[in-house]
Image: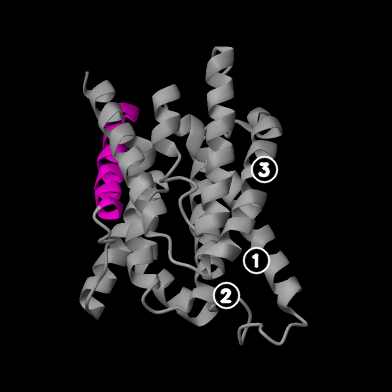
Amino acid sequence: MSDLTIVQYVLIALIFVWSGFVRSGLGFGGAVLSLPFLLLVLDEPLVFLPIIAVHLLVFSSLTIWMNNRKLANSSEAPAGGTVDWAYLWRILGIMIVPKLIGVFGLITMPSDVLSAIIFVIVALYSISYIIDRPFRSGSKTVDALFLMAGGYISGTSLIGAPLIIAVVAQHLPREKLRDTLFALWFILVLIKMAAFIWADVDLQLIHHLWLLPCAAVGHVIGLYVHDRMLQAETPIFFRVLGVVLLIVSTVGMFSVLG
């Protein structure tokens, strides 16, 4: 990213503030809701994915630790903490093989093809938000298929969260949903980072010095918003978000195909 303009650097910084906000506010979306914007600034997924991965490792573990410490002496603390570890290991067993297959696909796939896949997936997600019909499964078989597909997509581009949430959100209470997802993302991203290191992918370490603080600003705002969202449903927010994502994804797909 050394040859970017000042405007591009500012846009990337703002997008990472947004990334931190949606990650801590929703419990997912640090990649799926920011990567399309980043690819419009610089169409090189492997530049941004290691940065997003490190941010997720840092902020997911920090959030889980802070929440459990905060609730340690609270009478309202969920039984067993804020992470449902038994359920987490169960779904991880379903996802691990597709995840590894996806990781291999990421390393060997051309960047323009990966960008096109990302934009198509995000466009489908955005439509589900607009019509207020998020992905939902209705049986154990469909649950398994969604988890396997989400694991594979997570392996290719870190944006499999909506398919995974379609299953997990049906089986966990709201007070345990975000932190259980964070623990899952941590494990999945750790696998991704190991693959990056093995494949000698540039981790963009120098850029963490200025992008981590940007994500931290959004993270703090997102924590505040998450506490409010636990008390209210926000369908309008998701519809507006879906429209924005659909526009961005459409523009991105035309830019890649063009």
Name the residue tied to disc 1.
64
Q: Amino acid at mark 3?
A: Val
Q: Nearer the viewer, residue 247 or 140?
A: 247
- Give the residues drawn in magenta, as a range: 110-130
Residue drawn at (30%, 53%) of the image: 129
Indicate the position of residue 157 as horizontal and vertical percent values: 39, 44
Residue 160 visible: no
Kindly indicate the quadrant of the structure image that contains residue 254. Answer: top left
Q: Is residue 113 left or right of residue 190?
A: left
Q: Is residue 194 left or right of residue 233?
A: right
Name the residue tied to disc 3.
217
Residue drawn at (42%, 26%) of the image: 44
Residue 174 vertical placement versus 194 (above, below) = below
Q: Is residue 186 magenta?
A: no
Crowding at label 1, few (<14), some or many (≥20) Cα neighbours within 10 Å? some
Q: Is residue 241 left or right of residue 253?
A: right
Residue 208 vertical placement versus 187 (above, below) = above
Crowding at label 3, few (<14), some or many (≥20) Cα neighbours within 10 Å? some
Indicate the position of residue 217 as horizontal and vertical percent values: 67, 43
Residue drawn at (66%, 82%) of the image: 77
Residue drawn at (60%, 45%) of the image: 54
Which tag, 2 or 1, sits closer to the chain's start?
Answer: 1
Do tag 2 and tag 1 residues touch (Cβ < 8 Å)? Answer: yes
Indicate the position of residue 128 as horizontal and vertical percent values: 26, 54
Q: Amino acid at mark 2?
A: Val
Tell me how far mark 3 sits from mark 1, CA to CA.
Answer: 18 Å
Name the residue tied to disc 2.
83
Residue 2 is tagged as: none
Q: Tell which tag, 3 or 1, sits nearer the viewer.
A: 3
Q: Is residue 119 magenta?
A: yes
Q: Amino acid at mark 1?
A: Ile
Badge 2 element: loop
